[in-house]
Amino acid sequence: MNLFLTVVLCAVFLLRPADCAAGVHDGLSLAAHTALPALFPFFLSGALLVRSGTADVLSRLAARPLTRLYRLPGEAAAAVLLGWTGGYPVGAATTAELVRQGRLSPEDGARVNTFCNCASPGFCIGLVGLHVCGSARTGALLYGIHLLAAALTGLIIARQDSAAARPPASAVHAPHERFAAAFCAAVQQAAATALTVTAFLTAFSILLRLLNPLFGLLPGGSIAPGLIELTRGLMLMPSLPLSAGARLTLCSFLLGFGGLAVHFQIRAIAAPCGLPVTGLTAAKLLHGAIAAALTAGICRLSPTALTVFAPNCPPAAVPPVLPAVFAGATILFVIYTGKRAENTV
């Protein structure tokens, strides 16, 4: 089977060079203009949190709820937080770093990955809300549904695991690094993750170009691009001959599922550190199904609760001083916790 698929792909690449070139252009454009501007700061933040020791503070604060709800050790806190807020695949990158440093066992890391790889609030509000639905309020509510569905998915998976909450990984923890060294290493790690994401976006954009003639022949063919690459599929939603509620429910499912491009990104990030990905696809299907059910229920109970596919004024601009203050406070907090860790080692 592997030989057959390899030969078919190579043959198609040779026979359709123009489509391949257009797919490369699409993928690089998507990475440069949409994915990396939104994701790279979180790639950097996740690596820096773990390497500087700041994640240990989060671990102490979140240990009890993570253990009671999800049967996870407190060391998973950074991956859970960034996985729910940073966007695909920030959660997987943070989890992989925790496993690499021995702060999280591979088994617990695999469970974190099943429900802590989510779309970011900026993606839901900006792209899905404003550009697809025409309403920032709709995008914000979709993100809330998306997050609730992820939390419920984690609860279901945790209840299926009959073992009690496991203690932190028994491996020797890597010592905390000074801020300058941690920052340099975090930048290098973020660059490697960004390159992986770009490569997979490009590869799947090529596949979308090559498969495009087949989509029109399939029942519900316009849904297929979203199952392969999330962003492209979402941009097609307004053109589907469906009711607004049905399109919104479908958007919610695709956000939860994430698309095969995201699944392969997670696999590529997890492989070098031995992080298992068992059950990932089933968990993402469950995430999408729960999100779709919640969205359909809201649309049915209160059809006017969501303003869908209607123009809306853009959200008020955030004063540029606020992000600067937030970034400065974050850096000072990381430096402070890193110094405290050095003094206690």
Image (cartoon, grey):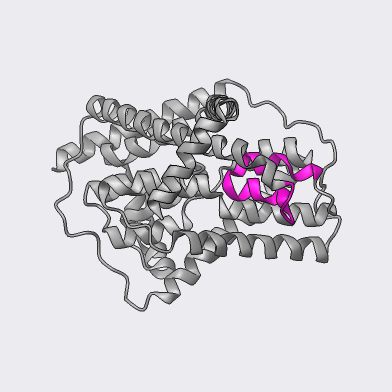
* In the foreground, 43 or 14: 14
* In the foreground, 147 or 14: 14
Q: Residue 29, position in %: x, y?
A: 57, 25
Q: Horizontal placement of 308 versus 331: left or right?
A: right
Q: Residue 236, position in %: x, y?
A: 73, 41
- Of all residues shown, which one is farthest toward the bottom? 162
* Depicted 228 relative to depicted 39: above or below: below
- Of all residues shown, which one is farthest toward the top? 320
* Depicted 83 relative to depicted 200: above or below: below
At x 80% / y 32%, what residue is drawn?
313
Q: Horizontal placement of 276 versus 139: left or right?
A: left
Q: Residue 215, position in %: x, y?
A: 69, 47
Q: Which of the 4 image quarters holds residue 7?
A: top left
Q: Which of the 4 image quarters holds residue 210?
A: top right
Q: Horizontal placement of 285 versus 45: left or right?
A: right
Q: Horizontal placement of 102 versus 140: left or right?
A: left
At x 79% / y 57%, what residue is drawn?
246
Q: Which residues are magenta?
A: 216-239
Q: Which of the 4 image quarters holds residue 55?
A: top left
